[in-house]
């Protein structure tokens, strides 16, 4: 039903620190060969920080937690042959024996099924800018409301409506915590001007918040929590530049009539082209940082008495 690699199964069994990683960013978020490099680099970051990485995807119809290096390579080179799997797509992929890369929503579902509660990604999906017309709101938000996984990210992708995304998370009762910041980061930029309700500056504080959210008898809720880490200073882009680029990318998507799951990959590729690859450098740097932070939090959790 659910295949765990030997290493991941042993680590979960022994209560060691484990960090889940997603595969949509490998198959549909970044170009080859950077995608394979980053897939391997994220696992290395998690290991270097003392935790066990578990990259998640569906291989030949089998939900897999802890992809092998050859499988990571297949996901990085597969292109459109590897499906983009959100929550709704899992059952069909399993029944049809297909390969599928899991989004944040689908990765959370499989991580929780495997007993993993910490997950690192780049930017989550959210409310799209034209959502009032298209109803395009990522399933990532709904999954955060119902699946007990802490998602470490750089906020929601800047192509989205960030204020609306925060509003939606509030409605769903999902705690959003800034890591070393009191502001919602804007993925490519450090600042969005949107204040966050909570802040933590150390892995132990995050572990305490996440433990209370899951287990405190008076407030425990069924869902997840979002930890937002701003992109590193050295690579973050100024918001004004990013906004101009995003407007052009959105206009291109509109002209091309792109809809549904294709929207996010299209916009990420258009922005990479418009910035001459600079956006990819930011994406890669923030992913590595998020993997490190997630590993430290997972270690702090493993060290807690409850
Ligand atoms: N973060 C990245 N690159 C990505 C994604 C996130 O840096 O490609 C993916 C995630 O898998 C996320 C998905 O869940 O984009 C959101 O897609 P949609 O907007 O269709 O829900
Ligand atoms: Mn969507």
Image (spheres, rainbow, N blue to C red):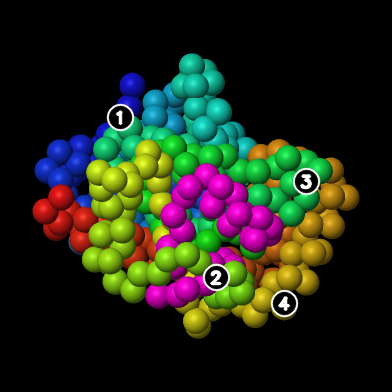
Label 3: element kind: helix
State if disc 2 and disc 1 touch (CB < 8 Å): no
Instruction: Give the label on residue 241, or none.
Output: 4
Q: CA distance from mark 4 to mark 2?
A: 22 Å
User: What's drawn in magenta, residue-wise?
Assistant: 159-187
Q: Please provide percent x and percent y for residue 144.
A: 47, 44
Q: CA distance from mark 3 to mark 2?
A: 23 Å
- Mark 4 lies within 8 Å of ligand 1 (Cβ measured): no
Q: Quadrant of residue 10?
A: top left
Question: Which residue in the protein does label 2 denote?
Answer: 195
Label 4: element kind: helix
* Label 1, residues with CA under 10 Å away: few <14, some 14-19, many ≥20: some
Sooner in the amino-acid sequence: mark 4 or mark 2? 2
Query: In the image as oriented, which residue stretches furthest toward the front?
Result: 218
Which residue is painted at 74% across and 64% down in the image? 246
Does the segment drawn in magenta span residue 3? no
Sooner in the amino-acid sequence: mark 3 or mark 2? 3
Instruction: Give the label on residue 132, or none.
Output: 3
Q: CA distance from mark 1 to mark 4?
A: 44 Å
Q: CA distance from mark 4 to mark 3?
A: 26 Å
Question: Which residue in the protein does label 1 denote?
Answer: 3
Q: CA distance from mark 3 to mark 1?
A: 40 Å
């Amino acid at each position: 039903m659910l295949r765990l690699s030997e290493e991941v199964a042993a680590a979960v069994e022994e209560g060691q620190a484990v960090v889940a990683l997603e595969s949509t960013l490998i198959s549909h978020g970044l170009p080859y060969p950077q995608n394979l490099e980053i897939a391997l680099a994220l696992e290395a970051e998690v290991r270097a920080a003392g935790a066990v990485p578990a990259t998640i995807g569906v291989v030949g119809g089998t939900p897999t937690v802890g992809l092998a290096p050859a499988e990571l390579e297949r996901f990085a080179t597969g292109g459109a042959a590897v499906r983009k799997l959100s929550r709704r797509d899992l059952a069909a992929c399993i029944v049809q024996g297909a390969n599928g890369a899991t989004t944040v929503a689908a990765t959370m579902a499989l991580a929780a099924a495997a007993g993993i509660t910490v997950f690192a990604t780049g930017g989550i999906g959210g409310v799209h800018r034209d959502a009032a017309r298209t109803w395009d709101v990522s399933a990532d938000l709904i999954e955060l409301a119902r699946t007990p996984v802490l998602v470490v990210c750089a906020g929601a992708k800047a192509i989205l409506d960030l204020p609306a995304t925060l509003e939606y998370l509030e409605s769903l009762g999902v705690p959003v915590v800034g890591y070393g910041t009191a502001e919602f980061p804007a993925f490519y930029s450090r600042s969005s001007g949107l204040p966050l309700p909570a802040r933590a500056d150390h892995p132990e504080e995050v572990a305490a918040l996440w433990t209370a959210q899951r287990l405190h008898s008076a407030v425990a809720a069924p869902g997840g929590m979002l930890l937002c880490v701003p992109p590193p200073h050295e690579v973050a882009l100024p918001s004004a530049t990013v906004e101009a680029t995003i407007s052009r990318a959105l206009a291109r998507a509109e002209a091309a009539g792109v809809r549904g799951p294709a929207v996010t990959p299209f916009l990420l590729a258009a922005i990479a082209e418009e910035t001459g690859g600079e956006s990819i450098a930011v994406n890669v740097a923030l992913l590595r940082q998020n993997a490190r932070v997630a590993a430290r939090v997972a270690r702090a959790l493993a060290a807690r008495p409850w």
